[in-house]
Amino acid sequence: DVKVTQSSRYLVKRTGEKVFLECVQDMDHENMFWYRQDPGLGLRLIYFSYDVKMKEKGDIPEGYSVSREKKERFSLILESASTNQTSMYLCASSSPGQGEGYTFGSGTRLTVV
Amino acid sequence: QKEVEQNSGPLSVPEGAIASLNCTYSDRGSQSFFWYRQYSGKSPELIMSIYSNGDKEDGRFTAQLNKASQYVSLLIRDSQPSDSATYLCAVKRGSARQLTFGSGTQLTVLP
């Protein structure tokens, strides 16, 4: 069964900490994405990557960075966590082509205190 | 105007009824359309995709697309309590790699 795996289901971090969220997919997908999901705001794209070492900003990249050193792994980095980054973070992957929707990971619920 | 808009919920239907979920999009260059189901506390899962005008059926689910009206819908026949979830409409524009999501419609199927 193909999978997108997020390393943590729940995280609690302190304000100002550097936070790493990891995502690994085993489908050999080129595209990987990071979204955050908040009540009333829906899914918002933070960053995505279409190849190793390639990245593009999404709609809300401020306060975040990403790293993709290997095709299967896409990391989201909160350089200095703030309380307004408390959210559900969802990783997804897809392959190129019209017909490909996303496969999502199970999500990481991050609380910044 | 939001890029992808879904009819405001929550939507409640009795068990066995047809649930109708609607979505409109603003970009005429959009090529691919997806419906995701998200149970509370879980991540979204893909249930339907549609690319051409008309209807596409998969079991109890039917997706309908009208590109001229920039409208896509999802019908759930014989609704079951297990269909209670939030349904997300997603659109891929032209050659874009990313999907744009609507804010979702919460569906409750009453036993």
Image (cartoon, rainbow, N blue to C red):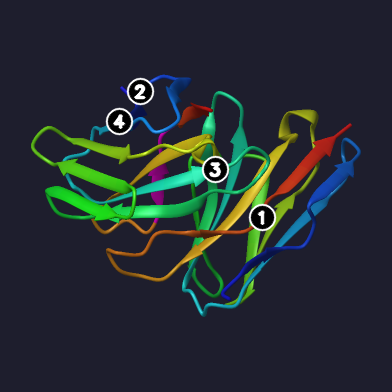
Q: Badge 3 sits on which subunit?
A: B
Q: Residue A82, relative to residue A55: is it above or below?
A: above
Q: Distance between the residues labelled 1 and 3?
A: 11 Å
List x then y, in percent, for residue A87: 70, 36
The residue where tag 1 is placed is A106
List x then y, in percent, for residue A73: 64, 72
Amino acid under label 2?
A: Asn
Does residue A55 appear to the left or right of A89 in the view shown? left
Amino acid under label 3?
A: Gln
Crowd band around label 4 with a 10 angstrom C-alpha radius: few (<14), some (14–19), many (20+): many
List x then y, in percent, for residue A97: 30, 68
Tag nearer the camera, 1 or 3 = 3
The residue where tag 2 is placed is B7
Q: Residue B38 carries which label?
A: 3
Quadrant assignment for the N terminus of chain A: bottom right
| Dot 3 and dot 4 within a common chain | yes
Amino acid under label 4?
A: Asn
| Dot 4 and dot 1 within a common chain | no
| Dot 3 and dot 2 within a common chain | yes
Crowd band around label 3 with a 10 angstrom C-alpha radius: few (<14), some (14–19), many (20+): some
Q: Distance between the residues labelled 2 and 1?
A: 26 Å
The residue where tag 4 is placed is B22
The kind of secondary structure element at disc 2 is loop
Labels 2 & 4 near each other (Cβ < 8 A): yes
The kind of secondary structure element at disc 1 is loop
Q: How far apart are marks 3 and 4 (CA)?
A: 16 Å
Q: Badge 1 sits on which subunit?
A: A
Per the rendered image, the range of residues in magenta is B98-102
Q: Badge 4 sits on which subunit?
A: B
Q: Which of marks 3 and 4 is nearer the N terminus?
A: 4
Q: Which residue is drawn at 27% across and 37% down?
A: B73
Q: Residue A93, relative to residue B62: is it above or below?
A: below
